Image (spheres, rainbow, N blue to C red):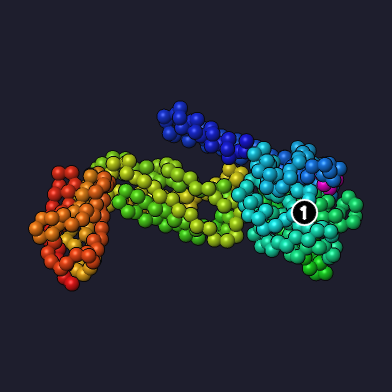
Amino acid sequence: MNRISLYTKIRNILDRYFNNVLKTRLVLFLLSTILCSASYSQQVSKVLISGLSGNTSHEMDVKNAFLIGYKSYDGTDYTGQIDLHVDNDVYSAIDYAHQNGYQIVVRSYTGLINAVNDSVEKYPDVLLFMPAGSNSFLYYCCLDIPNAAVVSTGAGTDNLATAYKVEFFSIDPITNSNESSFSNGFIAGQISYLANKLNISPQQARLVARNNSSSNQSITYVQYGKIDLGQAVQSNDSTISLPVELTSFTGAAFNDYVTLNWTTSTEINCYGFAIERTASLNLSKGETSGKTFWETVGFVQGYGNSNSQKSYSFVDNLSNLAILKSCNFQYRLKQIDNDGSFKYSNTVQSKINKPSSFELKQNYPNPFNPATTISYQLSVFSHVTLKIYDILGNKITTLVNQEKPAGTYEVTWNAAGQPSGVYFYQLRAGNFTDTKKLILLK
C-alpha cells in the first residue's frame, strides 16, 4: 500500500470514530508528518526489473547494470529492495509496481510506443525507465521528451535504430556492445542514486540529471545526453522545484451550487486537489463564524506529470446546508504531491443569494414571437408547476413540474405552433400561486 492510500484509509477511520474535527485534524497532521519524514529517508527503496518469461539471465544483467549505475559515482551500494518480475507487457508491469509500492520500474526490453507513455501518465507514483530501441528492432514513437512520463534511454553510439530522440544515453556497462537494455538499467541506477543522495524524489532526480548532462552533438538522437553524476551532486540541485503551476482558479454560484474551475500549465508529481471551503455557522440567519475554519468538501485526482494545460472542475452542492439568506463562501485548493507534501492556492469567493420571497416575474419580451422567457424565484424548497393557458382557460402546456430548491430560475416558452392571441402563465409553489398575462403577436 502506498503512503497516500494509507493516509486516506486512516483518515476515513478517524472521520468515522472521532466527532471532534480539530482533534481528528491534529492526528492527521501528525500522521502526515510521520509519513512524509519516513518517505524522505530513502526516496528509492523498491526497484522492479520487469522482463519477459524464459530469459532470466538477461534480466539479471539489467539488474547488475542498475547496481553498477547506482555505485558509479562514489562506490555507494544500493541497499534497497530490487526484484525481478515476469511481465508479458509493460502495462502489466507498471500496474504491478503501483499496486506493490515500487518507485522505479526498469523494463528490460524495448517496445516503447506512444500508448505506453499515455498509460504511464496514470501512475505518477512510479517512474518507468524503458529502452527506446535496439540495433535489431525499430519502433516509431514521437515522444515529447521534456514532458514524457516515461524515461526513454538509448545506448551510446549513433547507429541506434530508432526513429526518434531519447532522453538519456550511456555506454552499455555489461557487454560494451551498445545493448540498450543494459544502458537503460545503468541510467535508472544513476537517477536512483541521485534521488537517495540528494534526498529528493525520483522525478526531482530526473530533472537534476537533465540539468547536469553532457550532450554530444555527434549523437543526434539524444535530447539531454550522458548524465554527469559528479556535477549533479555538486550542483546542489536538491532544491529544484517541481511546480504544479496554477494559471486560473474561479468560482461561480447559481442557486445552491458553486462551480469551481481551475487550470494548470505544468504538473509534476501531482497526486490531486482537495477542495476546501470556509465552514459557516448560523446559515439560516445569514451569519458566518468570526474565525475562518476550512473544511474539505471534495477531491479531484491530478494528472501526475504534465507540461500541457489541464482543466479541472468541481461542483459544490450547498442545498443540504439549508441556507435561508445570502451567504459568502470562500474556496481554496490544497494541491497534494505524491510524497504527501502540499500547498494552498489563493482563495476565491462565491455568494449564494437566497430570495426572501416567492415571485413570478413578467415574461420578456412581451409581446413576443415566437419565444419568450419567464422568470421566477423561490424562497424555500418547493414543488413547482408552471403552466400556460389560453384565454378560455384551456391548458396549452406545462413548462415546469418538479421539486426545486430555493433560488431564481427562468424557462423559455416557444409558441411557434400556437396562434396569435392572449395567453396566461401560472406559477404554483407550495402555498404560493400567481398568474400573469402574455401576448403572442405574429
**Residue 78 vs residue 273: left or right?**
right
| Quadrant where the C terminus is found in the figure | bottom left
Query: Label 1: how many residues lie within 10 Å, few (<14), some (14-19) or many (20+)?
Result: many
Q: Is residue 83 visible?
A: yes
Residue 397 position by quadrant: bottom left
- Place of residue 97 in the rendered image (x, y in percent of width and height, measured from the top left): 68, 42
What is the quadrant of the N terminus in the image? top right
Q: Residue at x 43, y 50 (%)?
A: 314
Q: Is residue 429 magenta?
A: no
Stretch of the chain drawn in magenta: 61-65
> Circle 1 is placed at which residue position?
110
Q: Viewer-proximal residue, 210 or 407?
A: 407
Establish if 34 lies above or below 170.
Answer: above
Image height check: is 86 above or below 233?
above
The answer to which image quadrant residue 92 occupies is top right
Residue 121 coordinates in the image, percent (x, y): 62, 52
- Left or right: 268 as drawn, with respect to 368: right
